[in-house]
Image (tube, grey):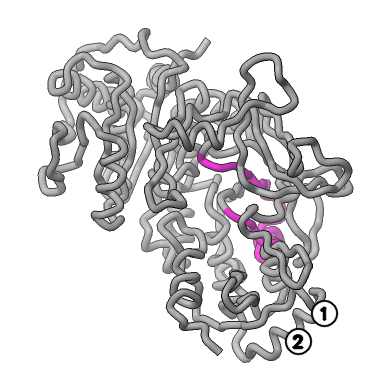
Amino acid sequence: MIRNVLEYLQASVERFPDKVAFADDVQEVTFGELHDRAISLAWQIRSRCGEARRQPIAVYMKKSVDCIVAFLGIAYSGNFYSPLDMTSPVERNNKILEVLQPVAIVYADEGSVLDGSWENIVLPGNREGSVQKMDVSGICDADPLYVLFTSGSTGQPKGVVISHRSVIDYAEWLADTFAFDEHTVFGNQAPFYFDNSILDIYSTLRNGSTTYIIPDVCFTFHKRLFAYLNEHRINTLFWVPSALVSVANGRALDELRLEYLEKVLFCGEVMPNKQLNIWRKAYPKALYANLYGPTEITDVCAYYIVDRDFADDEPLPIGKACTNTEILVLDEDNQPVSGQGLGELCVRGTCLSLGYYGNKEKTEAAFVQNPMNPYYRDLLYRTGDLVRYNERGELEYVCRKDFQIKLQGHRIELGEIETAALALLEVGQACALYDEGKKRIMLLISLSKLGADEKQIYQQLKVKLPWYMLPGKIILLEELPLNLNGKIDRVRLRKEYMENGTGES
C-alpha cells in the first residue's frame, strides 16, 4: 500500500539510482541525487520552521530541476508546496501569498528573495557523501501534497488543495492506461504552477522515467523544438492543444521529423481535429489521447484514446471516466440527463481535491452532496462544463456554462462556433466572445493561410452554421494571445476588443 508519493521516489532510487530523472537546459539530476538533495532541503526546512507538519510552503523560482528538488524537499519535511509564477505581476503573487500565508518560501538563489513575515530558504547546493535519513512513515495519503492557484471570478485567486492519495490514484491510472515505464521520456511543456505538469513529474517518479524540461524558446522556433526532442530521444508529449496547434499551423510537421515519437497526449482546452489530423497524418503510428479535467479533480477525470478518423469540423470526444472515477451528467434539476441531452459534468472519486485553501464558502459551493445519494456524505465536484453523450456513448465537451448564451431566443454554445471556424482551411486559431451590450457574437481569428478576409470567412461559416449563430463581427489578428498556461487568453481578448472598444463598428 502506497501512503505517499515519496515512496515512488524511493522505489526509483533503489531501481535506477544513477539514471537521469529530470533535466533542464542548465543541469540534470539522477534519482539518487534528487533524493539526497530533497532530503537535505527537508532537514533545512525542519531546522528553520520547526517540527510543524502540513504547513504551506511556497516555491519561487523559474521552471527548472531546482523546482522538483524544492517540491520533494517540502514533501519530505511533512509539509505541502505551492509554486508561484515568477512572471506573474507582483500584485497577483501578493494575493496568493495573502491567501496561502506560507511558513516559508524556497528560492533557487539569494537574488530572488521576497520580503515578508515568512522564512526565506535558499536551496542547499549539491553535497558529497550520504545524507541523514528522514522518516516519512508519518505522512499519510490524506495529507495535502500541493496547492495550485487558479483564477477566481472575484479577482481573488483560489488555491486548490490536492492530497498524496489523489496524485497516487492519478499516477497509477496513467501507468496502467498508457504503459509508462522506465523507457518513457517525457518532454515537459506545462508550467509547474499548471496542473498538466503533475503527469510529467509524478509519472517520472513512479515509473523511473525521465523528464526533459523543454526551454520556452523552443516553442517559438519549431526547428529548435524538433532538434531538442530528437537530441533527448523524447517519445512522450503531454501538451496543451495550443502548443500542438502552433506546430501544425507552422508547417513543421511537413518539413521536419521527430525520430522517437510514440505518444501524444493533450489536455487543458479543446483540441481541434483539423490540426490533430495534421499530426496523425505525419505520425500515424503514434498513440493520441484527449484528456479532460479541471485542477480540482487532480488534472484528469475523463479520457479518449483516438481510435478512428474524424472530419476537420467534428468534435473530438473526451470519452469516458478514468478508473476509480464516476462522472454524472446532471440537468438543471440535478437529475441525470437522458439520451444525448446537455448537462453539467460532475465528478466523484478519489481524484477530488480537498477543497479551496482557506475558503470554506467556495469549497461548499463547488464540492456538493451527490443529489443521487441522500444517505451519507458523498461529494461531487461541479465542473461548470456542459457535456453530452454522442451516439457512441462517448462524452463530448460542449462549452463552459458561462460560454452558453441565449440570442434571439436561441441557446448557443460559443464553442460550436469556434469548432466551425477552426475547420476552415484558412483559420489557425479562433475565439468566440459574446458582446452583451451590443447583443452580438464576435469571432477573433488568426489565419493559417494568407489571402482570406472577413467576408470570405463569413461566407464559409454560412455553410456550416445556422443564421442565428453567425458572428456579428469578425476580427482578423496575426495571432491570438496565449495566457501563461499556453491557452488562448480569452480574458485579454475580451478586455481589448469589447471592454476597451477596440472591436467597435
Magenta stretch contains residue 277: yes
How far across and down, in percent of the image, does residue 10 sit?
39, 18
Quadrant in which residue 410 is drawn: bottom right
**Residue found at x 24% / y 54%:** 90
From what the image shows, is residue 352 above or below residue 343? Answer: above
Query: In this picture, which residue range is highlighted in magenta?
Result: 269-295
Compute the Cα span from label 1 to label 2. 7 Å
The answer to whether residue 457 is visible is yes
Q: Are marks 1 and 2 in contact (CB under 8 Å)?
A: yes
From what the image shows, is residue 355 above or below residue 54? Answer: below
- Determine whether, in the image, residue 357 is placed left or right of residue 247: left
The answer to whether residue 125 is visible is no
Q: In the image, what residue type sits under mark 1?
A: Val
- Determine whether, in the image, residue 417 is placed left or right of residue 445: right
Q: In the image, what residue type sits under mark 2?
A: Gln
Residue that carries the numbered disc 2 in the rendered image: 459
How far across and down, in percent of the image, does residue 139 sit?
38, 13
CA neighbours of label 1 inside 10 A, class few (<14), some (14 to 19), many (20+): few
Residue that carries the numbered disc 1 in the rendered image: 463
- Determine whether, in the image, residue 212 is placed left or right of residue 296: left
- Determine whether, in the image, residue 476 is placed left or right of residue 131: right
**Residue found at x 47% / y 58%:** 486
Label 1: element kind? helix
